Amino acid sequence: MKYSLITPCKPAEYPQLLSLKHNLDRQNTHDFEWIIALNGQIDFSQPAWQADYTIQQVDHTPATLGAARNAAMALATGDWLVFVDSDDYLLPNALADLDAIDRLHPDVLGDLNQFPTYEPHSSFKNSLEQTNVHDSLPKWGGAKKREPKNRSLNLPPELFDQLPAQIDVDPETANWLSHRYFYIDGDQRWDLFNRQLKIAGKVINRRLVEKHHLQFAEDRELYPDFHFMTQVMSHTTGYLRLSEPSYIRVKHNDPINQPAVHQLTAPDRWQQRIAAWQDALADLKDPALHLAFGTYTLQRLHRFFYQALATSTPTEVDDVPALIKQLHDYLQMVEPAAFKTVPHLSRRILHKLRRRAQTPQTAINVIVRLRQLNRVIHHHGRGVTRLAYGWWFTKMPVKPRTILYESFLGRNFSDSPKAIYNYLQANYPGRFKHVWIMNPGVEETPAGQPNTTVVKRFGWRYMYYLATAKFQVINMRQPKWFVKRPGTKFLATWHGTPLKHLVFDMDNVASANPLYKEIFYEQSRQWDYLVTANQFSVDVFEHAFMYPVKQMLPSGYPRNDILSAPDRDEQAKQIKLKLGIPLDKKIILYAPTWRDDDYYGVGDYKFTLKLDIDRLRRELGDEYVLVLRTHYFITEHLDTTGFGDFVYNESSYDDISELYLIADVLITDYSSVFFDYAILKRPILYFVYDYEKYGSVLRGFYLNMEKDLPGPLLKTNDDVLAALHDLPTVTKNYAAAYQRFSERFNNWEDGHATQRVVDAFFNEDLTN
Ligand code: C2G
């Protein structure tokens, strides 16, 4: 038997085991056994567990990760131990590609080469079953960049003796092995120290483990493997890694519901970590490795000082004096040379801690202040205003009559915050001071209206009002560092009935911040109320945001009151005049949403126009004009010159509700705009040219798009034009569906939502 795969598994992770099993079945070589350390029963008689390799299960006490791995290792009979965690994947060629490891001396540390990724979505999982998937892996720059410059390409000659049978070798490539493997030995290999320390994906000779009686720490909940891995490193003489990643490590992006070990809250995490370092360092005899480990730990401490102490995030340390004492003890053990590798300010604090166990609290304080200053210098103005927010403005008294409004991140004066503002101005004049957050350059703002101030997002006055206004009315999310002060009230109006899966219902958030789910969760805990447009939204928000139903206002959307206003036709006429659209022309509104995969960088999305505007103009230009409205995430300005007076690009028009009012027909795709537009009972067409991809790969929907929509799904320009040429037929065919849709989504929208929201949220503040 060549390999023993070692997989620790908590009972709750059992379902993931089956998916790993499916994945192992597809390995190009089956010369392995699989040992699962799981406290629980696996029913091996089930068809899902049939395999042409041996699978064993083993119990372990205590129920720690270290004990699990030890128990599995004790049963192993393979030449090489391969550490595979239960929620990770191996590419089909992983073990076969490793074949040549045998031809090296046994004391080599093998590495399948980790590729870290976020919970892979279904198409990615499917691609794991194909033999050559490297091309389909998203590009991961980090691993390559960390490679040391002086990497050894001189592979040991043993590797070249004979080509491994399973590997499909390209005969044209004479030096294929040096493409397939990365090998490094001598002290040089400590340049890659950090990579070698992670156990997942590592391949270790079983006899080496037995000879040196290597074991994982069993009594540690966290960090059971420092000692084990450093011992493995000290007994091996070379490091062999597959050049291409073959071990797919799934990073968890839902720290709230499925935290990874490192995401578990443990206020004594640092104590535990340092204790594990102490154990590891105490047993390291090799001076170069000793120095490498010391250096690694000091770098971690540097990051700790920087991240945990110098940011506004509260530190997760319960017993600071004990930690300081422990650090003092630990730092005595570290090679003095390691200190030289740490940046200046952290080095000072580390030296202080090393010398004295009693007084370093002041040293820490000094460093924290210096670091904050450093941040200010690096972040320019924004850093200063944010510091003023945290240190100064949040200590000032709360202003009991001030309301701060923000719509779409300050990009426009619109949406439910605008409706609430207008309502308060009309019905409670002079009662409140209104502060609107607006980005510079926005044309339409409420500046100049009574009792109204407009402040620049992230500017000084913004920080001041963010800290002191009693009321916040915001349609997206507040900043991460926002402090919810006692006595203040936060109204989240949100900005659409959910169609696409949101937050906790999303599998993969590739284009967003990895901590998106956690950040969203923390932010939404600061909301006192969440406005909802229909019962459907209430149900979805409960799981998608994990938000309590009792804090949701079942009101309808304030932004939609205008669509039921008695004078809406007159308003529509005024809007047309304002936009310069001839009154005798009918209007098609095209309002698509954004695409998760169509972006320049994080949060910077583009849009590729697939609607054939030229054809629309040729065939419909006499009767219609087209109003084009891209989503607020789209940063580029689509060029529509050349279409004469047929196209009105209103992408930066402040309020889309006003565009609904003038539109005779709406073309959209997966945007929530149609929920609102449907209040007008006018025809809706869905131009969904990327329907399969969007629904299954990028997002997934809450609605059954084929059954629930009040209009047709159209995949080509031909379909769109045919529908536009015969709208009465569309209306007739979708009359029943439209009726059902309106009852389900719009029966709260009676034109009085704003009043309900204002009464519920401001309550006694309206009269006291
Ligand atoms: N919007 C707009 N113009 C567009 C698209 C959207 O002005 N071309 C505005 C509308 O007010 C819409 C809101 O932005 O209701 C949200 O847009 P969506 O396309 O639905 O997408 P998203 O911003 O991802 O919102 O729960 C709400 C949505 O599911 C998420």
Image (cartoon, rainbow, N blue to C red):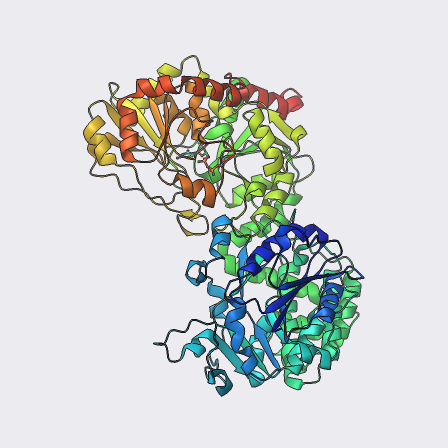
Residue at horizontal 69 percent and vertical 75 percent from the top: 351
Residue at horizontal 65 percent and vertical 30 percent from the top: 549
Left/right placement of residue 281 relative to residue 657 reads right
Choose top left, top right, bottom left or bottom right for residue 443: top left
Q: Position of residue 525 (x, y in %)?
A: 65, 39
Q: Quadrant of the C terminus?
A: top right
Residue 432 visible in the displayed image: no
Q: Quadrant of the N terminus?
A: bottom right
Q: Nearer the viewer, residue 176 or 640?
A: 176
Residue 474 visible in the displayed image: yes
Choose top left, top right, bottom left or bottom right for residue 564: top left
Q: Where is residue 490 in the image (x, y as percent from the top left)?
A: 61, 34
From this view, report whether residue 238 is shown above or below residue 749. below
Q: Where is residue 530 in the image (x, y as percent from the top left)?
A: 60, 31
Choose top left, top right, bottom left or bottom right for residue 482: top right
From this view, report whether residue 380 is shown above or below residue 624. below
Q: Where is residue 558 in the image (x, y as percent from the top left)?
A: 51, 24
Q: Nearer the viewer, residue 503 or 521?
A: 503
The image shows a total of numbered marks equal to: 0
Residue at horizontal 61 percent and vertical 82 percent from the top: 106
Residue at the outermost bottom position? 157
Residue at horizontal 70 percent and vertical 73 percent from the top: 228
Residue at the outermost top position? 566
Ligand 1 quadrant assignment: top left
From this view, report whether residue 189 is shown above or below residue 456. below
